Amino acid sequence: FNSQIDKRLTYMKNHLTRSLFGALTLCVATLGMAHDGSDHGSADHTHMKANSSVPSPAEIPQPMKEFRAAWVATVANIDWPTKSTLSTEEQKAEAIAILDKAAELNMTAIIWQGRPAADAMYDSKHEPWSFYLTNEMGTAPDPYYDPLQFWVEEAHKRGLELHVWFNPYRALHTNQINRGGAVSDDSIVTTRPDLALELEQGWRWLDPAHPETQDHSIR
């Protein structure tokens, strides 16, 4: 598990470095073309500079720090937890390993998937507990803990920000279906099948055009 974390986070860091270098190279090349010593169009260029509303570098607010983040996907047990059958302590250990590695690689934030498919990886009043957390949709961790609270506290201990993203329209993933995961009685797939449209292979997707879907997704 730790080797998988190493490879994933190291790849993210290297990809970020290459992307930033590429963007910097493009900016330098563009500036070079704009100031290549040619007099062609110099009058128009001077006119544009005099009337430009683009702020000078000194006027542009500078970020307090870089945002270097790693995604932690929970759907289908992609990143965390690696299995839906892990105990509370095993889940916590995996989370700490990810956060430790992120801190080691000088990341500044974690983007954590909190609602994979009309379910929740945290204690929610609006969505059932996720199948990917306890292997049974609607069932809380035992021993109980709130994973979101745990991730926030442990991230902050390491100087990391914790951001949460959710999928507003996916209501049921085929991964859960293929693994025999039953849909809970309090899932919107059960309570409002008119909103959770059935697609190919058993996917369920909330109708984004329906006002009640919109109300549900932003709660």
Image (spheres, rainbow, N blue to C red):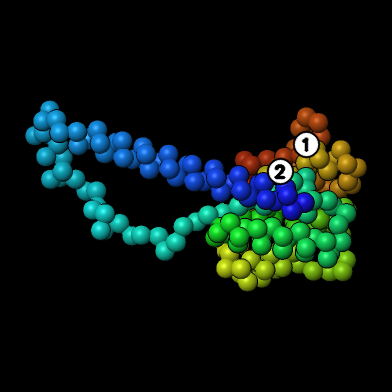
Label 1 to label 2: alpha-carbon separation = 8 Å
Q: Residue at x 88, y 41 (%)?
A: 179
| Mark 1 in CB contact with mark 2 (< 8 angstroms) | yes
Q: Residue at x 47, y 42 (%)?
A: 19
Q: Residue at x 61, y 68 (%)?
A: 158
Considering only vertical position in the picture, is 123 above or below 218?
below
Quadrant assignment for the C terminus: bottom right
Residue 123 seen in render: no
Query: For the residue carrying disc 2, how many other residues have a C-alpha within 10 Å: few (<14), some (14-19), or many (20+)?
Result: many
Q: Earlier in the sequence, mark 1 or mark 2?
A: 2
**Local secondary structure at mark 2:** strand
Q: Is residue 74 left or right of residue 58?
A: right
Considering only vertical position in the picture, is 19 above or below 40?
below
Label at residue 203: 1
Q: Quadrant of residue 161?
A: bottom right
Q: Residue at x 55, y 59 (%)?
A: 106
Q: Measured from the top left, where is residue 105 in percent x and y?
A: 58, 56
Residue 157 seen in render: yes
Q: Measured from the top left, where is residue 99 in percent x and y?
A: 66, 61
Q: Is residue 173 left or right of residue 48?
A: right
Type of the residue with mark 2: Arg
Query: For the residue carrying disc 1, how many other residues have a C-alpha within 10 Å: few (<14), some (14-19), or many (20+)?
Result: some
The one nearer the camera, 183 or 91, is: 91
The one nearer the camera, 17 or 181, is: 17
Label at residue 170: 2
Type of the residue with mark 1: Trp
Q: Is residue 196 left or right of residue 176?
A: left
Q: Is residue 195 left or right of residue 17?
A: right
